[in-house]
Image (tube, rainbow, N blue to C red):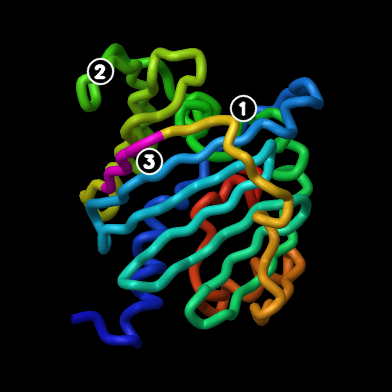
Amino acid sequence: MVSSSAVPRTITALLLTLAIPFAAAAADPPAEEKSQTWYTERIITGAATPGVEHLWSKGPWLRSELVVAGQPIVQIVRGDRYVIVNRLQAKGISIERNPEAIRKDASRQRPIGDDREVILAGGGEEAGDGEVGGQTCTVYRLTDDQGRRETCVSTSEAHVPLRTVFWHRASNRSTEIRYLTWASEVPLTDKFFEVGADVEIESYGYEQYLKALETGSVGPAPPTFSHLLHGR
């Protein structure tokens, strides 16, 4: 049984294993890609309590719903804000994104499932062929002072990740992400990427948020997609 006081620590522990900062590349895709939509479901296991996460994107916008120890954590990236909400508590924070992160929105094929792009931008490289669930995929790997990050990406035109594994050098533990399903052209409204009016939101400027972190955790959870907040 997990006590209520332990829940925030459990959420933080899981999300921090995923929020490894790597550089992201930049380029300018056609404007019509803004309306492209994606959905995926993934299971996160390993160093922390297992979590089930649902992800949607519409162009550069992202919505994540992750359940950890019964706590539904929603993260929304849209425009110049990164929002993190605990839906049970109806409370959250809205953080101003680094301008560099906003500029790089245009370069991403999609803000979810960009594991290969993140690894390559961080200096990683292709590392052979693999197989996940009977499906052939291409392995990409990055090893640095933080550990090793490896993903196996489908050979289809969409190049979606099927499995990603982090090995953390400091703890000598691994976290695995398995993508269970992928769908594109999902009908998503703009309102789906908004926070409900019943949620109490505390707003932070980017530098203000960084300053607040110096004294401890801020908000219901750390940002899973840290490169979408910081741009690096």
Q: Nearer the viewer, residue 214 or 84?
A: 84
Which residue is found at the position 44% from the left and 68% from the top?
72
Task: Describe the element under mark 2 as helix, strand or loop.
Answer: strand
* SS for callout 1: loop
- State the residue at coordinates (46%, 27%): 116
Q: Is residue 179 magenta?
A: yes
The residue carrying mark 2 is 130
Q: Which mark is residue 73?
A: none
**Residue at label 1?**
109
Q: Residue at x 59, y 80 (%)?
A: 91
Residue 155 position by quadrant: top left
Q: CA distance from mark 3 to mark 1?
A: 28 Å
Task: Residue under label 3, please give it.
Answer: 145
Q: Which contiguous range is marked in magenta? A: 175-181
**Amino acid at circle 1:** Gln
In the image, is residue 83 above or below residue 107?
below
Along the line of sight, the residue nearer the viewer: 220 or 72: 72
> How dense is the environment of label 1, judged by Cα within 10 Å: few (below 14), some, or many (20 and up)?
some
